[in-house]
Image: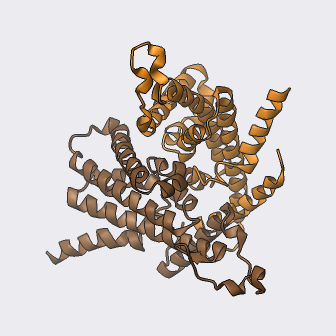
Chain colours: A orange, B brown
């Protein structure tokens, strides 16, 4: 029971209080570029949940079994406890993410062509989405264990999904408003994001 | 000759205002906001980006005829990631405190759309010198917005600039005055709103219209 409530509070915290997009500004590029239509934003959001849920645990394993100081002890070679490869973290993580995205794309194409059709064009974009790399780096910084990494990865994706769909619906309505010329498009989207972010801030009063 | 010179100057100065990477090209907003609570982190981040962007643009331009177009993304990412590792280790060695504050955002330069975007859009098609200049100009254009946002947030949120007290102490409520810092500016919404207003201002001055 104790463990369950721990994971539950991690979920709430990651989705609402420490929302990857609204509190840490990760994934802003695709957030602003894709939020013009509701359908596409749902597609991208789902793809992020999916990929993030896979890459964070995979990167956790890479970090714990390959990169960390003393992580290579399991190979049984003498002197391995001194080897520290953590300076390679960035390059290995980004390569893993690119490879995982490719793998997910191929598997989806094979297993569920309909899902592939709807997520298809977003998957390659995700390889350079800051939110994905950011989640993996946060996982390292906050020292999560494997189960926490799974929960954190998925809920960070859900947080991104919620934020992007909210903005897309609001921008849809905005088409009918008369906005000053210079503020149209990016400007008003930033101000709106500020307001949404302020709304999410109010969750931070909750004590978990 | 004069034409060529004008073009070179334009490559360098364009990104500072008219084709600014953040406000006009909408690239690199991710990290632009997170490091702007204080001006010193914004300045260090700008320095790191100048290094990475000039480096990656130069290397990509030098290799542009050797990179097969099908695998170009992964090649560029590798070049960028290597440069980011170098700058991250340098920051940890020389300005450890600030590097701790920047936390994961130095690493996120890899996925900063400006770097990959400029490599793809400019360095793959242009000479080494032009690409290096383009990288320098874009990094400075990015830094300009970063420092402006950081200055606004630090001034309104903490009453300081670069750590120096700007608003006199006696004006604060604790000392019998009437002034209170705007706490919202330190939090995430402040960054979004300041950047939104800055984009509005810049686009009105330049007469830029989004279709």
Give the residue at x 45% y 51%. Answer: B109
* Horizontal and vertical percent position of residue B177: 76, 87
Residue B19 appears left or right of B66: right
Q: Tell me if I can see residue B113 in this picture.
A: yes
Residue A205 appears left or right of A156: right
Residue B181 in which image quadrant: bottom right
Residue A108 appears left or right of B25: right
Give the residue at x 54% y 55%. Answer: B101
Task: Say if A62 sits above or below B134 in the image.
Answer: above
Which of the pair A122/B123 is nearer the observer?
Answer: B123
Task: Say if A198 sits above or below B93 in the image.
Answer: below
Which of the pair A153/A101 is nearer the observer?
Answer: A153
* Horizontal and vertical percent position of residue A52: 60, 35
* Horizontal and vertical percent position of residue A108: 57, 25
Give the residue at x 21% y 40%. Answer: B66
Which of the pair B133/A205 is nearer the observer?
Answer: A205
Task: Say if A104 sits above or below B133 in the image.
Answer: above
Q: Residue furthest right?
A: A1
Q: How many marks?
A: 0
* Horizontal and vertical percent position of residue A174: 70, 64
**Considering the image in quadrants, where does the C terminus of chain B appear?**
bottom right
Q: Tell me if I can see residue A175 in this picture.
A: no
Residue B129 in which image quadrant: bottom left
**Considering the image in quadrants, where does the N terminus of chain B appear?**
bottom left
């Amino acid at each position: 029971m104790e463990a369950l409530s721990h994971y539950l509070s991690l979920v709430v915290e990651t989705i609402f209080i420490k929302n990857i997009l609204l509190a840490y500004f990760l994934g802003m590029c695709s957030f602003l570029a894709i939020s013009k239509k509701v359908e596409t934003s749902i597609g991208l959001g789902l793809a992020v949940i999916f990929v993030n849920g896979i890459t964070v645990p995979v990167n956790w394993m890479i970090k714990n079994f390959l990169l960390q100081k003393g992580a290579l002890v399991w190979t049984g070679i003498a002197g391995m406890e001194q080897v520290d490869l953590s300076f390679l973290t960035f390059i290995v993580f980004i390569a893993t993410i690119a490879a995982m995205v490719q793998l997910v794309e191929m598997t989806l194409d094979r297993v569920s062509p309909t899902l592939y059709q709807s997520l298809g064009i977003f998957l390659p974009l995700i390889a350079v989405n800051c939110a994905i790399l950011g989640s993996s780096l946060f996982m390292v910084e906050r020292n999560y264990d494997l189960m926490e990494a799974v929960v954190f990865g998925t809920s960070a994706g859900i947080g991104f999904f919620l934020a992007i769909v909210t903005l897309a619906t609001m921008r849809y309505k905005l088409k009918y408003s008369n906005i000053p010329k210079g503020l149209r498009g990016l400007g008003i989207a930033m101000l709106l994001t500020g307001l949404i972010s302020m709304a999410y801030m109010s969750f931070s009063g909750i004590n978990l | 000759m004069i034409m060529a010179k004008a073009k070179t100057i334009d490559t360098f100065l364009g990104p500072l205002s008219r084709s600014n990477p953040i406000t006009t090209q909408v690239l690199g907003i991710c990290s632009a906001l997170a490091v702007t609570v204080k001006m010193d982190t914004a300045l260090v981040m700008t320095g790191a980006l100048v290094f990475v962007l000039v480096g990656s643009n130069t290397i990509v331009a030098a290799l542009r005829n050797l990179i097969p177009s099908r695998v170009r993304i992964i090649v560029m990412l590798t070049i960028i990631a290597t440069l980011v590792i170098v700058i991250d280790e340098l920051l940890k060695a020389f300005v450890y405190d600030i590097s701790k504050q920047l936390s994961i955002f130095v690493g996120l330069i890899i996925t900063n759309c400006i770097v990959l975007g400029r490599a793809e859009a400019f360095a793959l098609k242009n000479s080494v010198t032009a690409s290096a200049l383009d990288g320098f100009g874009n990094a400075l254009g990015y830094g300009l917005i970063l420092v402006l946002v950081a200055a606004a947030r630090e001034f309104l949120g903490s009453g300081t600039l670069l750590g120096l007290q700007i608003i006199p102490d006696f004006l604060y409520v604790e000392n019998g005055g009437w002034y209170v810092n705007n706490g919202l500016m330190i939090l995430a919404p402040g960054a979004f709103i300041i950047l939104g207003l800055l984009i509005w201002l810049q686009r009105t001055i330049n007469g830029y219209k989004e279709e």
